Image: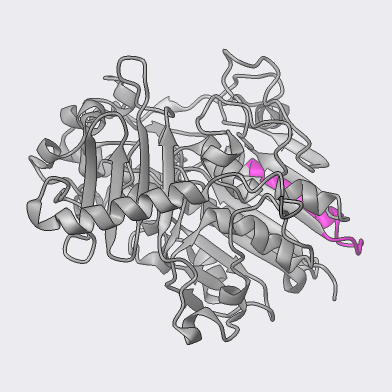
Amino acid sequence: MKQPNILWICTDQQRFDTLGCTGNSFVETPNIDHLAANGVLFENAFSQSTVCTPSRASFLTGRYPRTTRCRQNGQNIPEDEVLVTRLLADNGYGCGLSGKLHISACHPSATFAGERRINDGYHQFHWSHHPENSWPTNEYIQWVRAKGKEYNPQPYEGSRYVQIGPDAADHQTTWCAEMAVQFIEANEEYDSPWLFSVNMFDPHHPFNPPMDYLQRYLDRLDEIPLPNYVEGELDSKTYVQRFDHHGAYGMPKLYPYSKMIASDHRLLTAAYWAMVDLIDVQVGRMLEALERTGQLDNTIVIFMSDHGELLGDHGVYLKGPFFYEPSVHVPLIISYPGHYGRGTRVTDLVELVDLAPTLLEAAGLPKHPGMQGKSLGKLLTGEASDADSGEKHRDDIYCEHYNASSKQDGVGGFATMVRTERYKLAVYHQKGEGELYDLAEDPNESVNLWNAPEAAAIQMEMMVRLCDRMAETVDPLPVRLSGW
């Protein structure tokens, strides 16, 4: 059987509830909805970190953040980590990328040429970490300038928090898709399998959609729901949440929830959704290119995000050591016509760390011995297995945040989380603080049961579960060779 191509679309900082197929009645996402209708939508997919670098290093290697040693933004992934793209490239796949990779330090203060790379397997590397002109090697900026234009978003009149970005034709999301379309077209006449990663920066802040995409929301601003925040809920929450309530990452000028009014919240949500709408249009372009070149039926298409966005929920914007559903619950859709389920919705708990072994299995390759994820193959094909036997793909979800953001007194939050179908426990290490939620009784995660006497038994059970999951992240490498 011919090995499948892989079109791997990964957005940045996109919540699960931002698509029509996941219940959002405001957004316009017909192309992604169509992908779900013809593939498998995972209703309970979760990231292994709430920030970019640890999450991306995790799902690219199939290993947990603390195992990859890539635990925070601003770190370099070690040279000896093995990416699934490298394994595929070593076995005949032609691999390309557009947009960001972000598994190494990627800040102008740390790098002058762009992102440092390991042997990642990408033969074509159209790199643009973000749209701003921070590096001369930002290919998106080169593309915009070749059109005789400059990247220059403007403040939206009357708002301190929303900007108006380039027209859709000049947007970084569009450029990422354009590079993918060119790659797809270039492979039309070749038999060798390929993988292309489309890693657009949107809908990551700053919130700067094209004006015509924002416009459709402006007449409906009063209908847009306000963030999920209960006045006084911070009293029972952690130190870092109270800290970031007055500015994301502890920075008073960066989306300070405490200084915003209702119209600010609604406009920010509108801008965020408008960026998702643009993503959908570009997903449509890529799917059309696959169909036009006759490659759709032999291509696995993945749509996902690396982590979520709080968007004002619980009184905080952006991200940090917060394990609320909007932070860790991400969209995940996988389509492979004729091979995977069509219009299937999977309710099992799955982790993004499961993707790397899934792709190796789909390509007919063995799982790398260092991988800790579990293939989603049986859930995708609908084979009689987990569900029929009464067993689930996973009993719980594990997520980490190690000194990655929201720094207070120079130290970021050290926190870990475990989540079952019903309960969620987050522990803020060295602080004596934590969170415990009953997701059945309190799906909005407003009532912290950490100090509730009636929840003590559940808390202990979840603590044991968390310890077990942390123990399971021990590196399986080097492999054991004998009995002693």
The residue lying toward the viewer, choosing from 190 and 302, is 302
| Left or right of 140 in this view: 409 | left
Q: Quick check: can you spot residue 462?
A: yes
The residue lying toward the viewer, choosing from 423 and 162, is 423
| Left or right of 221 in this view: 156 | right
The residue lying toward the viewer, choosing from 280 and 306, is 306
The residue lying toward the viewer, choosing from 276 and 399, is 399
Residue 383 sits above or below residue 64 on the image: below
User: Is 423 in the magenta?
Assistant: no
Circle count = 0
Q: Position of residue 212 (x, y in %)?
A: 44, 45
Write the residue at 54% across / 72% down: 40
Q: Position of residue 291 (x, y in %)?
A: 73, 69
User: Is 183 in the magenta?
Assistant: yes
| Left or right of 437 in this view: 172 | right
- What range of the chain is rendered magenta? 175-193
Q: Quadrant of residue 475?
A: top right
Q: Quick check: can you spot residue 50?
A: no
Q: Quadrant of residue 160?
A: top left
Q: Position of residue 91 (x, y in %)?
A: 86, 55
Residue 127 sits above or below residue 23 on the image: above
Decide whether the magenta segment is chiefly helix, strand or loop: helix
Query: Residue extending furthest right?
Result: 190
Question: How is the structure coloured here?
Answer: one colour
User: Could you tell me which quadrant the N terminus lies in?
Assistant: bottom right
Q: Position of residue 312 (x, y in %)?
A: 26, 41
